[in-house]
Image (cartoon, rainbow, N blue to C red):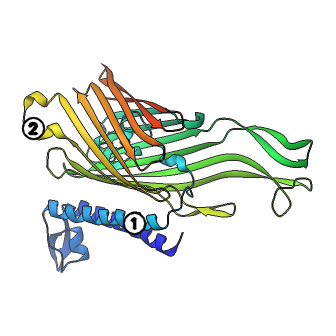
Amino acid sequence: MSAIQKYILTFDVVQFIFSTLSLILHFHPRSISLNGMNRNITFMGLIFPKLHVRMPMSRYFLLFIISNIFSCFLSSSYSQETQQIAQTQMVFLGIPVGGRYTGMGSAAVGISEGTEAVFFNPAGLAFASNDWEIFVSETNYIADIKQTAVAVAKGINTIGTFAATAVFMDYGEFVRTVRTDNPNQPYLNLGNFSPFSLAIGLAYARRHTDRFYFGGHVKVVHENLGISRLGLDEEGTDISLGYRDVQNKLTVIAFDFGTRYYPGLGDLNISASWQNFSGEKSYAQQSFSLPLFINLGLSMNVLSLLNDQAVIPHRLSFAFDFVSTKDFGNKYHSGVEYCFKNMFSLRCGYKFGYSEESFTAGFGFRLMKKADYAIGMDYSFSEYGIFNDVHRISLLIHK
């Protein structure tokens, strides 16, 4: 990672933490003692006591949004000049999960809510019910790869919502071989192996006001790609003089952050999320970073603008995400969802900036209510160009 890249990444993290903390505490003054007198003072007032002026929430959040937009475009503009095409590792972290938002072109940063949102924007986790929510997703990905995701959330009044998450990637079974110099037997069969990837995490989200939400997600990411047999020569290709077996596995820590704000125009929201923050890692003789995503999202139920009782059972939501990635430039996700009485939904979307991914569609049901528990099912279909189409199905159980 170059010095400029490190500076930009550090700027992104510090700017997000500082601006979020400032926004949270700006509207909750704390009582402190100054010159023997108790006074209420805000977070910004503590840092800049002479410059601090209390602003309306709308103006303060506008500064917050501008700073994050500047951060996204600073990172994306630099990444366009120094793209590391396909140079990140543990890329399974960039494969979306669930059957709902993937049916909307993965335009989920602004619209995702509940337990499933932790995989797109942790701030949306704050919308989970105060009781338990359980989310399970299964994906038939390209090349017979299987993805399984699980999340369990619990809301606690006045504190926030907590969740435990897990994503498992099964790459199937492969034949392990090693090259030889024998023309009659050019390789040796060393048996089969099954590589896999796993990410387990803990998340927290909170509704700070009726307009502002924030959340975070810490993940332990592990990848095991089996064992390599290397020769003892300099290049590691000649095993006739002896060999050594090398374990191809690595474990790292990664972080996600997210925010959401409702400015007051219907249910329009402006959201941002930062996914897979982690330091640069070294593996064998090569250093790499995780697939970093910096996302801005907008979503709105356009029917919320109508003051008409007849449209209350209906919801027509549009969502759009701008996604800046470190290794493949900028991408754009768009989607629409129609929902009737929170019982049946139809969805479609389109992903721009991808070589193979494009159109998506899906639907969802709320299947039943029994003993105060509701069960929902969502399905999505995604076009993948020259690859097989991808199908996802997920279940959500909540009280």
Kindly report which numbered mark, 1 or 2, lies closer to the viewer in this rendering.
Answer: 1
> With 1 as the anchor, is 37 left or right in this view?
left
At label 2, the amino acid type is Leu
Say how many tags the image has. Answer: 2
Q: Which residue is mark 2?
A: 306
Which image quarter: residue 142?
top right
- Image quadrant assignment for residue 133: top left
Quadrant for the C terminus, please.
top left
In the displayed structure, would residue 249 be above or below residue 49? above
- Location of the N terminus by quadrant is bottom right
Residue drawn at (47%, 59%), measured in percent from left and top?
A: 326
Q: Nearer the viewer, residue 106 or 201?
A: 106
- Answer with left or right where residue 141 lies relative to residue 38: right
Instruction: Give coordinates of residue 36: x percent, y percent.
Output: 16, 78
Labelled pair 1, 2 in contact (Cβ < 8 Å)? no
Residue shown at 54%/50% (left/top)?
91
Element under label 2? Answer: loop
Relative to residue 87, is residue 18 drawn left or right? left
Q: Is residue 279 visible?
A: yes
Mark 1–mark 2 distance (CA, rounded to whole Å): 39 Å
Viewer-closest of 280 and 374: 280
**Upstream in the sequence, badge 1 or badge 2?**
1
Which three-letter amino acid code belongs to the residue tagged 1?
Ser
Q: Position of residue 83 (x, y in %)?
A: 50, 63
**Is disc 1 placed on a helix, strand or loop?**
helix
Where in the figure is residue 262, as x and y percent of width and height?
20, 50
Q: Residues within 10 Å of mark 1 (few under 14, many from 20)?
A: some
Foreground residue among 394 and 387: 387
- Say which mark, if any, is on residue 2: none
Residue holding disc 1: 77
